[in-house]
Image (tube, rainbow, N blue to C red):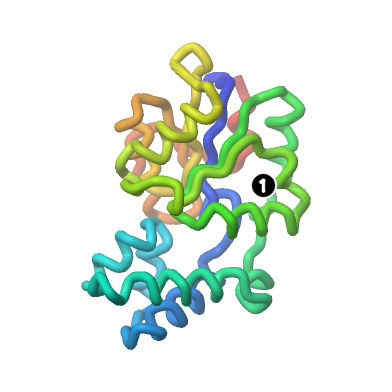
Amino acid sequence: MKEYDTYLLDFDGTLFDTKESLKPVFRKGFGAIGIEVTDRECEVFMHHTLLQAAEMKHVREEQFKPLVDAITIAMDSEEVLSLIKPFSDTVYLISELRKRNKKVAIVSGNLSNHIRLVLSLYHLDAQVDAVIGSDMFKHGKPHPEPLLLAMEMLGASEKRRPVYVGDSLQDEQAAEAAGIDSVLIARDDDSREAKKTTIAEFAELFRY
């Protein structure tokens, strides 16, 4: 594995297990505008921005703000927060990156304030240099905009050798479009179809 100076990390499915927590969020959000969603649709939405998910369900323009409002409220509810858990090696990864003086940013299609809230619950917020959520960019992954924004915020460049660590082919595609390396952790079948580096656990990132 190559050594990098800047680590851009996906949130959902990579650092935190949000699969079950996001289902009630999407049900309540879309339900608020009279649209039913299935569990399978919720699992697809997890890898997209809310705007992309809304487009998949043909949400009308005037319905989008009520959808966002309902989603935002649901995401930070006690019920949903209680269902979000870090993967077994998440704390190890972030702590090890800080110990090695690496730049660290979370880059996700999730909302930035929600990500910060979850990080704070697990006392990880002070160990992350930046959080880039879907409320901060227009084009979601696989478009490179989220990663390019993170690199700009951190002052990353080819010289600083950034890498994006995610769990889906969409993450790999976004990194490729941004001109940087990617590493996917094998959380599900999607990541196992990756063209490039796939790991089984975060410790593999440090086997140079």
Q: Residue 31's x, y, as percent?
A: 39, 85
Q: Residue 80's x, y, as percent?
A: 61, 74
Work out whether 165 lies above or below 116.
above
**Residue in the image at 31% along x and 47% along y:** 139
Residue 118 visible in image: yes
**Residue in the image at 57% along x and 37% along y:** 105
In the rendered structure, the answer to whether residue 162 lies left or right of residue 65 reads right
In the rendered structure, the answer to whether residue 183 lies left or right of residue 196 reads right
How crowded pointer 1 is (Cα within 10 Å; few <14, some 14-19, many 20+) is rated as some
User: Which residue type does callout 1 highlight?
Assistant: Thr
Which residue bears the numbered disc 1?
A: 90
Task: Pick the residue in front: 203 or 171.
Answer: 171
Q: Residue 112's x, y, as percent?
A: 54, 52
Residue at the top extreme?
159
Work out whether 33 lies above or below 184.
below
**Residue in the image at 37% along x and 52% along y:** 190
Q: How many marks?
A: 1
Task: Pick the residue in front: 204 or 91.
Answer: 91
Task: Pick the residue in front: 72 or 47.
Answer: 72
**Residue in the image at 64% along x and 52% along y:** 116
The image quadrant of residue 208 is top right
Q: Residue 143's x, y, as percent?
A: 30, 41
Mark 1, secondary structure of its residue? helix
Work out whether 161 lies above or below 20.
above
The image quadrant of residue 121 is bottom right
Residue 192 visible in image: no
